Amino acid sequence: MKLLTYLHAILYGGLLIGQDLTGAWSSLEGKTQSVWIMTENHFSITRYESEPAIFISTSGGIWDKVDDKVIMNWEFDTSSPEKVGTQTTANLIQSKNNIQWKGAFWIRMDKGQPGSLQGAWLITGREREGVISERIPGARRTMKILSGTQFQWIAYNIKTKEFFGTGGGTYQTINGQYTEKITYFSRDNSRVGAQLQFEFKLIDGKWHHSGKSSKGKPIYEIWSKRADLGI
Protein backbone atom coordinates (compact mmCIF):
# COMPACT_ATOMS: atom_id res chain seq x y z
CA MET A 1 0.00 0.00 0.00
CA LYS A 2 2.86 2.39 0.83
CA LEU A 3 4.51 1.63 -2.51
CA LEU A 4 1.27 2.41 -4.36
CA THR A 5 0.95 5.68 -2.47
CA TYR A 6 4.53 6.55 -3.39
CA LEU A 7 4.00 5.77 -7.09
CA HIS A 8 0.78 7.79 -7.05
CA ALA A 9 2.78 10.78 -5.74
CA ILE A 10 5.24 10.49 -8.64
CA LEU A 11 2.60 10.05 -11.34
CA TYR A 12 0.27 12.78 -10.15
CA GLY A 13 2.71 15.48 -9.14
CA GLY A 14 2.66 14.93 -5.40
CA LEU A 15 6.39 14.22 -5.14
CA LEU A 16 8.14 16.49 -2.67
CA ILE A 17 11.87 17.00 -3.32
CA GLY A 18 14.39 18.23 -0.79
CA GLN A 19 12.53 17.56 2.45
CA ASP A 20 14.34 17.04 5.72
CA LEU A 21 16.23 13.72 5.65
CA THR A 22 17.01 13.80 9.38
CA GLY A 23 15.93 10.69 11.26
CA ALA A 24 16.05 6.97 10.53
CA TRP A 25 15.00 5.01 7.45
CA SER A 26 14.62 1.28 6.86
CA SER A 27 14.67 -0.99 3.83
CA LEU A 28 13.96 -4.72 3.59
CA GLU A 29 15.29 -6.96 0.81
CA GLY A 30 14.50 -10.61 1.45
CA LYS A 31 15.92 -11.39 4.89
CA THR A 32 18.27 -8.41 4.86
CA GLN A 33 17.26 -5.40 6.96
CA SER A 34 18.97 -2.06 6.30
CA VAL A 35 18.88 0.92 8.65
CA TRP A 36 19.96 4.37 7.51
CA ILE A 37 20.51 6.96 10.27
CA MET A 38 20.75 10.60 9.18
CA THR A 39 21.68 13.42 11.54
CA GLU A 40 22.18 17.03 10.49
CA ASN A 41 25.60 16.32 8.96
CA HIS A 42 26.43 12.64 9.50
CA PHE A 43 25.03 9.30 8.46
CA SER A 44 25.42 5.53 8.73
CA ILE A 45 23.94 2.68 6.70
CA THR A 46 23.93 -0.81 8.22
CA ARG A 47 22.79 -4.16 6.84
CA TYR A 48 22.00 -7.21 8.94
CA GLU A 49 19.71 -10.23 9.31
CA SER A 50 17.63 -11.02 12.40
CA GLU A 51 16.81 -14.74 12.29
CA PRO A 52 19.44 -15.95 12.81
CA ALA A 53 21.30 -12.80 13.83
CA ILE A 54 23.96 -11.96 11.24
CA PHE A 55 25.83 -8.67 10.87
CA ILE A 56 26.53 -7.95 7.18
CA SER A 57 28.05 -4.48 6.71
CA THR A 58 28.12 -0.85 7.74
CA SER A 59 29.26 2.38 6.08
CA GLY A 60 28.88 6.09 6.62
CA GLY A 61 30.44 9.48 7.16
CA ILE A 62 29.52 13.09 6.44
CA TRP A 63 26.77 14.25 4.11
CA ASP A 64 25.46 17.47 2.60
CA LYS A 65 22.60 18.34 0.30
CA VAL A 66 23.20 20.37 -2.86
CA ASP A 67 20.08 21.15 -4.86
CA ASP A 68 18.34 17.78 -5.29
CA LYS A 69 21.47 15.68 -4.72
CA VAL A 70 23.09 14.28 -1.59
CA ILE A 71 26.89 14.45 -1.36
CA MET A 72 28.43 11.68 0.75
CA ASN A 73 31.98 11.77 2.15
CA TRP A 74 32.84 8.25 3.33
CA GLU A 75 34.65 7.75 6.66
CA PHE A 76 34.11 3.98 7.06
CA ASP A 77 32.93 1.11 4.89
CA THR A 78 33.30 -2.54 5.89
CA SER A 79 32.41 -3.85 2.43
CA SER A 80 34.63 -1.46 0.43
CA PRO A 81 37.41 0.05 2.61
CA GLU A 82 38.87 1.66 -0.53
CA LYS A 83 35.85 3.98 -0.54
CA VAL A 84 37.03 5.64 2.69
CA GLY A 85 38.19 9.18 1.98
CA THR A 86 36.22 9.45 -1.26
CA GLN A 87 33.09 11.37 -2.15
CA THR A 88 30.03 10.18 -4.04
CA THR A 89 26.81 11.79 -5.18
CA ALA A 90 23.43 10.18 -4.56
CA ASN A 91 20.36 11.00 -6.61
CA LEU A 92 17.41 10.38 -4.31
CA ILE A 93 13.72 10.41 -5.07
CA GLN A 94 11.96 11.45 -1.90
CA SER A 95 8.35 11.77 -0.90
CA LYS A 96 7.13 12.67 2.57
CA ASN A 97 8.02 9.40 4.31
CA ASN A 98 9.77 7.39 1.59
CA ILE A 99 13.03 7.43 -0.35
CA GLN A 100 14.00 5.57 -3.49
CA TRP A 101 17.74 5.09 -3.99
CA LYS A 102 19.70 2.53 -6.04
CA GLY A 103 16.55 0.52 -6.62
CA ALA A 104 15.83 0.19 -2.89
CA PHE A 105 12.72 1.55 -1.24
CA TRP A 106 13.28 3.17 2.18
CA ILE A 107 10.53 3.89 4.71
CA ARG A 108 10.89 6.54 7.41
CA MET A 109 11.24 5.12 10.93
CA ASP A 110 11.41 8.44 12.80
CA LYS A 111 12.15 12.15 12.33
CA GLY A 112 14.80 12.44 15.03
CA GLN A 113 12.37 12.06 17.95
CA PRO A 114 11.43 11.21 20.69
CA GLY A 115 14.91 10.36 22.04
CA SER A 116 16.77 13.33 23.50
CA LEU A 117 20.23 12.31 22.21
CA GLN A 118 19.66 12.67 18.47
CA GLY A 119 22.91 13.53 16.68
CA ALA A 120 26.45 12.33 15.99
CA TRP A 121 28.76 12.04 18.98
CA LEU A 122 32.44 11.18 19.47
CA ILE A 123 33.84 9.79 22.70
CA THR A 124 36.06 12.46 24.22
CA GLY A 125 36.50 11.38 27.83
CA ARG A 126 36.60 8.48 30.30
CA GLU A 127 36.83 8.09 34.03
CA ARG A 128 39.56 5.79 35.33
CA GLU A 129 40.16 5.30 39.06
CA GLY A 130 38.10 8.38 39.85
CA VAL A 131 39.94 10.65 37.41
CA ILE A 132 38.27 11.95 34.25
CA SER A 133 40.55 12.51 31.25
CA GLU A 134 39.34 14.21 28.08
CA ARG A 135 40.83 14.66 24.61
CA ILE A 136 39.79 15.57 21.08
CA PRO A 137 39.77 12.47 18.82
CA GLY A 138 42.18 12.19 15.92
CA ALA A 139 42.02 9.72 13.05
CA ARG A 140 41.02 6.87 15.41
CA ARG A 141 37.41 7.53 16.35
CA THR A 142 34.52 5.96 18.22
CA MET A 143 31.26 7.52 17.11
CA LYS A 144 27.70 7.11 18.31
CA ILE A 145 25.04 8.22 15.87
CA LEU A 146 21.43 8.41 17.00
CA SER A 147 18.09 9.26 15.45
CA GLY A 148 15.01 9.51 17.66
CA THR A 149 14.70 5.75 18.12
CA GLN A 150 17.80 4.14 16.57
CA PHE A 151 21.41 4.12 17.79
CA GLN A 152 24.73 2.85 16.47
CA TRP A 153 28.30 2.99 17.69
CA ILE A 154 31.19 2.59 15.25
CA ALA A 155 34.94 2.35 15.93
CA TYR A 156 37.19 3.12 12.96
CA ASN A 157 40.25 4.97 11.66
CA ILE A 158 39.83 7.48 8.83
CA LYS A 159 43.51 7.38 7.83
CA THR A 160 44.31 3.68 7.90
CA LYS A 161 40.72 2.79 6.81
CA GLU A 162 40.58 0.21 9.59
CA PHE A 163 37.27 -0.88 11.11
CA PHE A 164 37.23 -2.10 14.70
CA GLY A 165 33.60 -2.89 15.44
CA THR A 166 30.01 -1.69 15.59
CA GLY A 167 26.71 -2.40 17.25
CA GLY A 168 23.30 -0.84 17.29
CA GLY A 169 19.56 -1.12 17.59
CA THR A 170 16.84 0.82 19.35
CA TYR A 171 17.09 3.15 22.34
CA GLN A 172 14.99 5.20 24.76
CA THR A 173 15.77 8.12 27.06
CA ILE A 174 13.37 8.29 30.01
CA ASN A 175 13.93 10.06 33.36
CA GLY A 176 17.71 10.12 33.06
CA GLN A 177 17.86 6.48 31.96
CA TYR A 178 19.30 5.55 28.58
CA THR A 179 18.26 2.06 27.47
CA GLU A 180 19.63 0.19 24.44
CA LYS A 181 18.29 -2.95 22.83
CA ILE A 182 20.85 -4.54 20.51
CA THR A 183 19.65 -5.71 17.08
CA TYR A 184 23.10 -6.15 15.47
CA PHE A 185 26.64 -6.51 16.77
CA SER A 186 29.63 -7.09 14.50
CA ARG A 187 31.84 -8.67 17.17
CA ASP A 188 29.38 -11.18 18.62
CA ASN A 189 26.03 -12.06 17.04
CA SER A 190 24.99 -13.80 20.27
CA ARG A 191 24.65 -10.37 21.93
CA VAL A 192 21.67 -9.53 19.72
CA GLY A 193 18.52 -9.14 21.80
CA ALA A 194 20.38 -7.96 24.90
CA GLN A 195 19.09 -4.87 26.66
CA LEU A 196 21.44 -2.51 28.48
CA GLN A 197 20.51 0.36 30.76
CA PHE A 198 22.69 3.34 31.67
CA GLU A 199 22.36 6.66 33.42
CA PHE A 200 22.86 9.76 31.30
CA LYS A 201 23.20 13.47 31.87
CA LEU A 202 23.74 16.36 29.49
CA ILE A 203 26.28 18.70 31.10
CA ASP A 204 27.42 21.77 29.13
CA GLY A 205 26.27 20.06 25.94
CA LYS A 206 28.25 16.87 26.65
CA TRP A 207 26.70 13.44 27.17
CA HIS A 208 27.84 11.82 30.42
CA HIS A 209 27.17 8.08 30.15
CA SER A 210 27.57 5.67 33.06
CA GLY A 211 26.66 2.09 33.94
CA LYS A 212 27.99 -1.31 32.92
CA SER A 213 29.30 -2.37 29.51
CA SER A 214 28.04 -5.36 27.53
CA LYS A 215 30.76 -7.35 29.37
CA GLY A 216 29.51 -6.22 32.78
CA LYS A 217 32.34 -3.80 33.52
CA PRO A 218 31.61 -0.37 35.09
CA ILE A 219 32.03 2.53 32.67
CA TYR A 220 31.86 6.31 32.79
CA GLU A 221 32.18 7.98 29.40
CA ILE A 222 31.88 11.49 28.04
CA TRP A 223 30.63 12.05 24.49
CA SER A 224 30.74 15.34 22.57
CA LYS A 225 28.69 16.42 19.57
CA ARG A 226 30.74 16.32 16.38
CA ALA A 227 29.28 19.69 15.41
CA ASP A 228 30.71 21.21 18.61
CA LEU A 229 34.12 19.67 17.90
CA GLY A 230 34.12 20.80 14.27
CA ILE A 231 34.97 17.26 13.13
Image: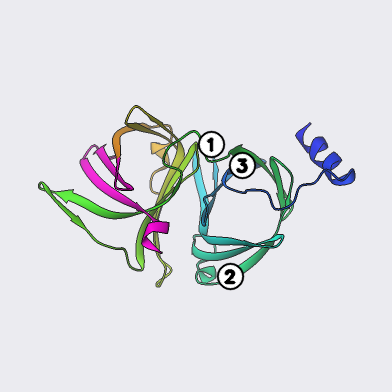
Left or right, 109 with respect to 230, comes to: right
Real-space Cα separation, disc 1 to disc 2, in angstroms: 31 Å
Name the residue rendered at 33%, 48% in the picture.
205
Residue of label 1? 50
In the displayed image of the protein, which residue is found farthest to the left?
Answer: 129
Real-space Cα separation, disc 2 to disc 3, in angstroms: 23 Å
Q: Please name the colour scheme applied to the rendered image.
A: rainbow
Nearest to the observer: residue 225 or residue 172:
225
Residue 180 seen in the figure: yes
**Does the magenta segment cover residue 230?**
yes
Left or right, 122 with respect to 108, comes to: left
- Mark 2 element type: strand
Residue of label 2? 87
Nearest to the observer: residue 205 or residue 63:
205
Looking at the rendered structure, the kind of residue marked 1 is Ser
Residue 33 seen in the figure: no
Real-space Cα separation, disc 1 to disc 3, in angstroms: 14 Å
- Mark 1 element type: loop
Q: How many marks?
A: 3
Left or right, 153 with respect to 214, comes to: right
How far across and how far down the image is residue 145, in percent? Answer: 45, 49
How far across and how far down the image is residue 46, in percent? Answer: 53, 49
Checking the image for residue 26, the label placed there is: 3
Name the residue rendered at 33%, 67% in the picture.
138
Q: Which residues are magenta?
A: 202-231
**Does the magenta segment cover residue 177?**
no
Nearest to the observer: residue 130 or residue 96:
96
